[in-house]
Structures are given as C-alpha cells and as structure tokens.
Image (cartoon, grey):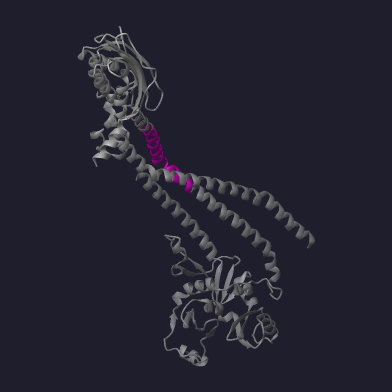
C-alpha cells in the first residue's frame, strides 16, 4: 500500500510539473494569437490548469492587450479590416468558381489580397471573397502575421445554433448557419437586430437565437479557430505573391520548417524520456512485492518437490501382510518353510510338505490375491517321502480388495 | 540567391547529420528500452497476480506435509540411529534379535531416502509379527526386498530363521510457515503446522 501511495504521489507531482510546462508553452503560443479590430489583443490563461482536459477549457481564457513587439502567428481581423462579398455561380467545379471570383472587379475600399472560400450546397457553388487590408494590419501590428483569418470565417466555424448574435467589442455580428454554408453580417443602420437579419435572409427563427456577449469573445474566437477547415488555413496563410508581406514571410518558411522539425524532435524525445522515467518508477515501485512473489514461487517449487517425493515414496510402499498370512497358513498346514525371497509383490517360497506340493500350488492359485503361481524348480521327494518344492507367486492385495468390493456390490 | 539556397541546404544537412540522426538513434534505443521494460513489467505483473495463489498453495502444501510429517524423519542425522533403535525395540518386544544393522546412504533428492540393511533372527511367528509391527509403525519404513532362510538344518521345524531386509525410510525437511505467515500477517498457519 505504501509503494502504491508513493507511486501515486510521485505521479501527481510529475503530472503537476508537466501541466506547468504545458501552461507556459500554451501562454507563449496564445501570446502569438492576436485579435485586431481596434487595439490588438492577445489570448492568455492565468490559472494553471489542474488537468490535461482543463487545458482545452476555453472558457477560462482571457484577452489582454498585446505588449511588446513580436511576430504574431495568427491574426484574427475584425470587421474594420476586411471587406467580404458572396457569390453564387452555376459553374461545374470549385476550381473554376475560385478562378472566376478572383478575376471579378474588386469592390473593396482598400487594396489587399483576396481570399476566396468555395462551398457546395444545393447543386450550386457559393464563393465568399474576403479582402483583408494587409497594409493597415501591418501598420497596426508592426509585423506581418503568418496566418490572417477574417472574423467572419471564425464566427462561421463556431459550433453554435442556426441563428446567433455575437457581441465582439463594440460591434455586433449576426450569423445564420445551414448544413454546409453560413452567412455573416455586421449590425448596420438597415439591419439593427437578429429579426432584421433573418427577415433579410428569409429565415424563419421560431426557435429563437443564441446570443454571445463580449465576455465570451475569447471562448468564441478560440472555439471557431479550432473549427476552421484546412481550406481556411490555406487561404489564411500569408505567403502568396499578391501579398505585400510575401517576401517577408518567404524568409520565414525554412525557419518555420526547422522550428517544426526541432519542436517535433524535442517533444517526441520528451515524451519518450517521460515514459522511460515513468516506467522506471513503476518497475522500482513494484520491486518489493515482486521479490516477495519470487520468494513465494521458489518456496512453491521447493515444497512441490517435497510433496512429489512424498507421493512417489508412498506409492512405492508395499505391504507384505498377505505374504505373511500365506506363510502362517502353510506353517499351520504342516509345511516346513525353508526360505522366502520377496521383492515387492513377488515372492519365491521354498518348503517341504508331507502332502502334495501340487495341491498347495492349486490352493495358492485359487486365492483372489494371487495373480500367478507356479513351481520354479522340479518338485523332489526326500527319503521320508516329503515333497520339496520351490514356488513363485505374484500377488496384488489391492486388486483382490477391489474385486472383493465389486463382488459385494 | 543560389548561394543562399546552398547555405540552407548545408544547414539542413548539418542539422540532419548532427541533430536529427543522433536524436532518432536515441529515440530508437529509448523505444527498445521501453519495449523491454514494458515486457518486464508485464511479467512482473503476472508474477504479482500469481502471488496470492502461490502463497495459498504453499500454505496448503505445508499443511499437507505437516500432517504426514510424523511418519518421516526430519533430520538426516537422527534417521540412522532412530531406525536402528526402532528395529531393536520391536525385536526385543517379540524376543527376536537384530543381528546386524547397516545404514547405507541418504539420497540427494528433495525428499531424501535413507537406505538400510537389517538382519533379524527369530521363529517364523516372531518374524511375521516383527514384519507386521514395522509396517504398522508410525514411522514409515519400506522394505523393498527381503530374504528369509533357516539358519540351521532346513528340515528341523524349530530351527530359527534369519531374515535379511533391504529398505528405506524418508527424511522430509521440516517446513517452516513463519515467512508466509509474516507476509500474510495472520496466525492461521502457526496453529496448525
């Protein structure tokens, strides 16, 4: 019990240390995820999580203003930084739709890279073209992010009801979700409420709508971030030739690859080292009980040998009581016993009888205990007329006893 | 541009040679070590699982041995003298006589057998009773082979017989249950063993 307690105590300490390391790594990573709509904000988690599951409890996360100058990994841009428009095109495939949308005249009031997401629904292709004001974003952040993701993508990817209202800072967004597509609109003079939004879309909201306050913004943004599909991440990567930041980011590619490689190696090595330590602790913790079990097994082997020896010896023990009874009867019949040699249940009896030796043999054969009886030498007659015989018998009192029991039954 | 690419390539090769390959080698070793340790742990776990079974079986076998223990000798040293004394005592009670006693050897088995040879003089009736008394004695004495003959003229009825036995007794080590008892923390064994 003590060893188990020691192991669990040590396990708790190791898990706590690992959680602290994860907490630091998570905060380092979260500092590099910024939300830009006014003042750039980054994410943070102040409390050290009590379990690995708590690491992914986004409701405990907060948003704090960005301090210091570093390159953001992900920038989520608010409505002030992007212009989005939707198109429904009757074209045969998504690639053609994307090509056509990219060549459509730009309506955005600012220049920037156009990011196009295409989704298929109801046998048609819906294209969402989003232009981000990259130049303004860089001027606000100081450095270009690696992934630039418009807020409407994040809100679309957030797993919530079919009709939602999001309060993000001072702005309000309305989202309508279908099976495969979604529509995001910002509150405006002509669209004051969810009802106006649903009326504009022709959506009937009889089951009401979900409303997310500004306090839930970190939760909504991180949940949406994890819900983005691969296409969003590809479109959000700011490495294209159209981007003003392309040359800057191209320099980062080998660094990112190297970082990823080193990170993977370090992480996998750390996991292996931890497993090794953990295994070593488990082995050493069970050493005492294993030694006891080994001793018990050795004792078992020793005692088994003794018991087998006893059983074998007891099996070899043969009682000659029957033979002595036969000798006694022969003596009472007047037979002079000259000698007896006995090995197990076999005996050779030498004797002299005034009567017939053949009768003695015949009487011997009649006994149920006797399996076989015969003379081993010719019967001779002495001067007095007595017969000298040498008779061998094989007997088994156990078999005779079994036969007797069978007959009684 | 070309020089830059070559520089990156060189950096990549150096990283692979001096970082990735050694780390992967170490990881392989660590994985093998973990695999061995996990097998060892599985074996240990199986042994630990069987521990109560071994303990219970040991106790049961110790009890069984203890029950038959009085039939055997528990010391190689005492077996020869006590066997000889046993024969003398039985023979004297029947007015027979032990002519010769020879202790042969003790085998080196887990349950050693102490072999002996003994010769006894007496009438047919005395020898019969001697034999049966030895067989029904508390201590197990097994006669593997014996030869009885008349000492003097074989046609003389009253002439005494000499019987020469070859046999063995068992020497079973006295088993102590104290260790198992202390591991279990009970007095269950000590009362009965």
x then y, percent, for residue B167? 34, 20
Q: Magenta span has A290?
A: yes
Q: Is residue B116 visible?
A: yes
Q: Is residue B74 magenta?
A: no
Query: Residue A281's image quarter?
Result: top left
| Above or below B55: residue A124 | below
Picture coordinates of residue A364, whole percent (x, y): 30, 25
Side (left or right) of B28 relative to A286: right
Q: Relative to B185, does residue B14 appear above or below in the rendering?
A: below
A39 lies left or right of B58: right
Foreground residue, B34 or A265?
A: B34
- B84 relative to A133, above or below: above
Q: Which residues are magenta?
A: A278-304
- Give x and y (percent) for residue A168: 49, 79
Q: Residue furthest top?
A: B152
Foreground residue, B128 or A172? B128
């Amino acid at each position: 019990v003590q060893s188990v307690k020691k192991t669990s105590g040590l396990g708790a300490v190791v898990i706590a240390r690992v959680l602290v390391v994860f907490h630091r790594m998570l905060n380092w990573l979260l500092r590099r995820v910024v939300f830009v709509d006014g003042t750039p904000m980054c994410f943070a988690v102040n409390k050290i999580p009590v379990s690995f599951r708590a690491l992914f409890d986004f409701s405990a996360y907060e948003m704090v203003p960005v301090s210091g100058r570093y390159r953001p990994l992900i920038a989520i841009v608010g409505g002030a930084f992007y212009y989005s428009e939707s198109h429904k095109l009757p074209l045969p495939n998504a690639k053609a739709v994307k090509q056509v949308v990219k060549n459509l005249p730009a309506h955005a009031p600012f220049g920037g890279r156009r990011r196009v997401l295409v989704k298929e629904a109801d046998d048609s292709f819906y294209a969402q073209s989003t232009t981000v004001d990259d130049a303004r974003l860089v001027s606000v952040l100081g450095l270009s992010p690696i992934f630039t993701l418009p807020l409407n993508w994040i809100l679309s990817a957030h797993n919530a009801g079919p009709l939602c209202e999001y309060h993000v800072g001072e702005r309000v967004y309305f989202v309508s979700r279908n099976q495969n597509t979604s529509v995001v609109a910002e509150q405006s003079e002509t669209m004051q409420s969810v009802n106006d939004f649903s009326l504009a879309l022709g959506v009937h909201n009889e089951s009401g709508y979900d409303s997310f306050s500004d306090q839930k913004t970190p939760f909504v943004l991180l949940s949406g971030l994890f819900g983005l599909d691969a296409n969003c991440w590809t479109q959000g990567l700011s490495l294209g030739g159209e981007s003003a930041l392309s040359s800057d980011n191209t320099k980062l590619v080998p660094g990112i690859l190297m970082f990823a490689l080193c990170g993977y190696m370090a992480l996998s090595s750390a996991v292996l080292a931890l497993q090794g330590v953990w295994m070593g602790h488990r082995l050493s913790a069970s050493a005492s009980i294993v030694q006891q079990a080994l001793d018990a097994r050795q004792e078992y082997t020793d005692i088994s040998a003794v018991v087998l020896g006893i059983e074998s010896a007891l099996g070899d023990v043969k009682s000659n009581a029957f033979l002595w009874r036969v000798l006694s009867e022969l003596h009472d019949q007047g037979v002079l016993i000259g000698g007896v040699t006995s090995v197990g249940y076999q005996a050779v009896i030498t004797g002299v009888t005034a009567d017939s030796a053949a009768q003695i043999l015949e009487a011997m054969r009649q006994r149920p205990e006797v399996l076989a009886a015969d003379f081993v030498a010719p019967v001779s007659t002495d001067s007095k007329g007595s017969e000298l015989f040498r008779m061998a018998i094989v007997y088994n009192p156990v078999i005779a006893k079994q036969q007797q029991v069978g007959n009684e039954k | 541009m070309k020089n830059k690419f070559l520089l990156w390539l060189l950096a990549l090769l150096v990283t692979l040679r001096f970082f990735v390959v050694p780390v992967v080698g170490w990881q392989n070793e660590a994985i093998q070590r973990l695999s061995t340790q996990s097998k060892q742990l599985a074996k240990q776990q199986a042994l630990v699982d069987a521990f109560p079974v071994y303990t219970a079986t040991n106790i049961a076998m110790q009890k069984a041995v203890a029950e038959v223990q009085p039939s055997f000798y528990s010391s190689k040293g005492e077996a020869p003298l006590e066997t000889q004394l046993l024969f003398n005592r039985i023979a004297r009670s029947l007015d027979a006589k032990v002519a010769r006693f020879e202790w042969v050897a003790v085998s080196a088995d887990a349950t050693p057998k102490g072999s002996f040879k003994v010769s006894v003089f007496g009438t047919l009736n005395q020898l019969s009773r001697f034999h049966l008394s030895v067989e029904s004695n508390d201590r197990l004495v097994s006669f593997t082979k014996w030869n009885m003959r008349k000492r003097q003229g074989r046609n003389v009825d009253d002439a005494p017989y000499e019987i020469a036995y070859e046999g063995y007794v068992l020497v079973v080590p006295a088993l102590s249950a104290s260790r198992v008892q202390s591991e279990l923390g009970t007095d269950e064994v000590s009362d009965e063993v």
